[in-house]
Image: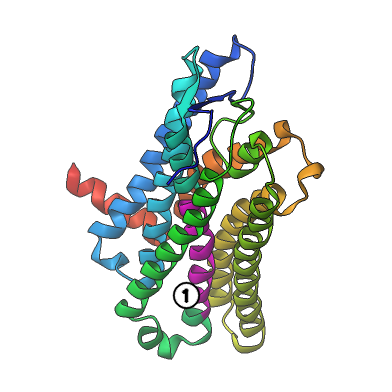
Amino acid sequence: MLNQTSVTEFLLLGVTDTEVLQPVLFVVFLTIDFLNLAGNGAILIVVICDPRLHSPMYFFLGNLSCLDICYSTVTLPKMLENFLSVHKAISFLGCISQLHFFHFLGSTEAMLVPVMAFDRFVAICKPLRYTVIMNHQVCIQMAVTIWIIGFFHALLHSVMTSHLNFCGSNHIHHFFCDVKPLLKLACGDTELNQWLLNNVTGTFAMGSFFLTLLSYFYIIIYLFFKTHSCGMLHKALSTCASHFMVVVLLFGPVFFIYIRPASGSSMDQERIIAIMYSVVTPVLNPLIYTLRNKEVKEALRRVIRRKV
């Protein structure tokens, strides 16, 4: 049950207080939302429709695109509504739900990245055993597992936050409901919530980051000492470079927001960083993969030809 509190709704103060910028920002973020849906939707369609892309690498890429579509959908529609609204309210239940799904999808994506890195490690370093290690059943199990873990990780934060008492201001200095802005509004002791945020979320992020780096480390060592083909070396490093760009875009902002001490950043900085990982990064992911991946571009052309 949700905690009995005098606050029944919150007011999201948004990205900026300048009214003149609201319509401009509405157009900008609406365009970003369209690009996100178009880019990730296109990848999802070609991965599902093209039999040549029915491999573990593209299965996980499809999962990433699905997550990116859902991830930005959690925050962008409400943000766009508030750009054109005077009363920028969100209900208490709506706020907790937004917090839950934001952390559910975010933590799932954070765990998906090392799984994708492990897939590349097996494909490059153990090519003869690749189909055995990364068989269809294993891929399904890995995907289902990270989605379930992500859900329960988010449930921990949403339940703990919902049981806090909010008896003062209901003005959230953010464009969506997140744990840190809500903790600033809570009455009473929030030490346990802050500890869970720093340690549990921090462990998820740091663990995923280092497992990803470990996979890349082994890949690079293997390529330099075992591979004598410059073409294969270039292709493998190119694939890893694309993946590593996603890693930097995902984990950089997460470390800044959730692992850095609360006193180390202002709310304005956190809002800008949050825009990067919740709005901009989902748009960049399909660009990174499609611009550097010939197979995806060719599959996209085949799908377009069939539609035409």
Magenta part of the chain: 103-121
Is 60 magenta? The answer is no
Report whether residue 291 is seen.
Answer: no
Q: Position of residue 3 (x, y in %)?
A: 50, 42
- Measuring 41% from the left and 39% from the top, which residue is drawn there? 73
Q: Is residue 291 left or right of residue 305?
A: right
Q: Where is residue 49 in the image (x, y as percent from the top left)?
A: 23, 57
Q: In this view, does 296 lie to the left or right of 289?
A: left
Q: Where is residue 216 in the image (x, y as percent from the top left)?
A: 62, 73
Q: Quadrant of the C terminus?
A: top left
Total marks shown come to 1
Compare residues 51 and 302 and report the one nearer the observer.
Answer: 51
Amino acid bearing label 1: Asp
Q: Is residue 185 left or right of residue 147?
A: right
- Measuring 66% from the left and 48% from the top, which residue is drawn there? 253
Report whether residue 283 is seen.
Answer: yes
To which residue does mark 1 refer? Answer: 119
> Label 1's element?
helix
Q: 186 above or below 163?
A: above
Instruction: Name the image quarter holding residue 242.
Output: bottom right
Q: Quick one: which residue is furthest to the right in this view?
A: 264
Q: Where is residue 294 in the image (x, y as percent from the top left)?
A: 42, 59
Is 109 magenta? The answer is yes
Which secondary structure class fits the magenta region best?
A: helix
- Measuring 63% from the left and 25% from the top, which residue is drawn there? 169
Compare residues 77 and 23 and report the one nearer the observer.
Answer: 77
- Measuring 43% from the left and 56% from the top, which residue is drawn there? 64
